[in-house]
Amino acid sequence: MAIQMPALIRSEKRAFNASFKRYSYLESSTPVPIAMWIFDFPVTFGKIDCNFNARIVCPKYIDDYLALEDGHVKNAITFYLLDGQILKGIKLVGLREEAVRLFHKTIRKQLSMEYTKAEYSRYLEAMYQYSTEELFRMGKIFKK
């Protein structure tokens, strides 16, 4: 996940390095399910959100991601902190298995449906009528 922070300041870099203590996973109740992750970084950085549309990803990558390893889900997520085209930090984090399984469920729902990019965008836009804080509270909250 790329996090773009133009004109990055020292306190933002420290917040990134400190990482998040909590995160939330939300599957929207819209006709096209939107997968949303919200990560609660320290104050200077704040909460950041990202969404995922499985239908635009190469099926081979999705199949590989959904495949279990020794009975466990692949739970690693890598964050890249960027200031323009300059890499300022990398962080590898393991998410809770329960959270990743919820994400897998949403991916499978998306793949079982037919919808256009325009439809996905319309429902995503509807989700962004909520603040990042509201989206965080609407999701299932996990501690790191």
Image (spheres, rainbow, N blue to C red):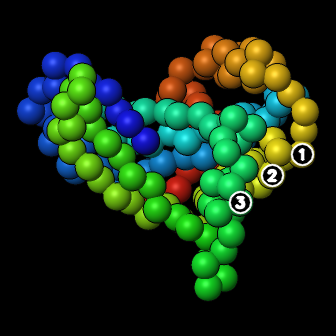
Which circle's residue, 2 or 3, is located before the other in the chain? 3
Q: Crowdedness of circle 1 by 10 Å Cα count: few (<14), some, many (20+)?
A: few
Pick the quarter of the image with the N terminus. top left
| Distance (Cα) linking label 1 and label 2 | 6 Å
SS at mark 3? helix
| Distance (Cα) linking label 1 and label 3 | 14 Å
Residue contact between numbered discs 1 and 2, judged by CB atoms under 8 Å: yes
**Identity, as a three-letter code, of the amino acid under mark 2:** Arg
Name the residue carrying label 3: 63
Which label sits in the foreground, 1 or 3?
Answer: 3
Q: Which residue is drawn at 29% across and 53% down?
A: 91
SS at mark 1? helix
Judged left or right of residue 126, residue 13 is: left
Q: Which residue is drawn at 68% across and 55% down?
A: 60
| Distance (Cα) linking label 2 and label 3 | 10 Å
Percent position of residue 113, x then y: 90, 38
Q: Say which quarter of the image contains residue 130.
A: top right
Percent position of residue 92, x then y: 34, 58
Q: Nearer the viewer, residue 19 or 5?
A: 5
Judged left or right of residue 22, residue 69 is: right
Compared to residue 85, the image places residue 16 above or below, namely below
Percent position of residue 112, x then y: 89, 45
Which label sits in the foreground, 2 or 3?
Answer: 3
Name the residue carrying label 2: 108
Q: Crowdedness of circle 2 by 10 Å Cα count: few (<14), some, many (20+)?
A: some
Pick the quarter of the image with the C terminus. bottom left
Percent position of residue 29, x then y: 81, 33
Label ID, residue 112: 1
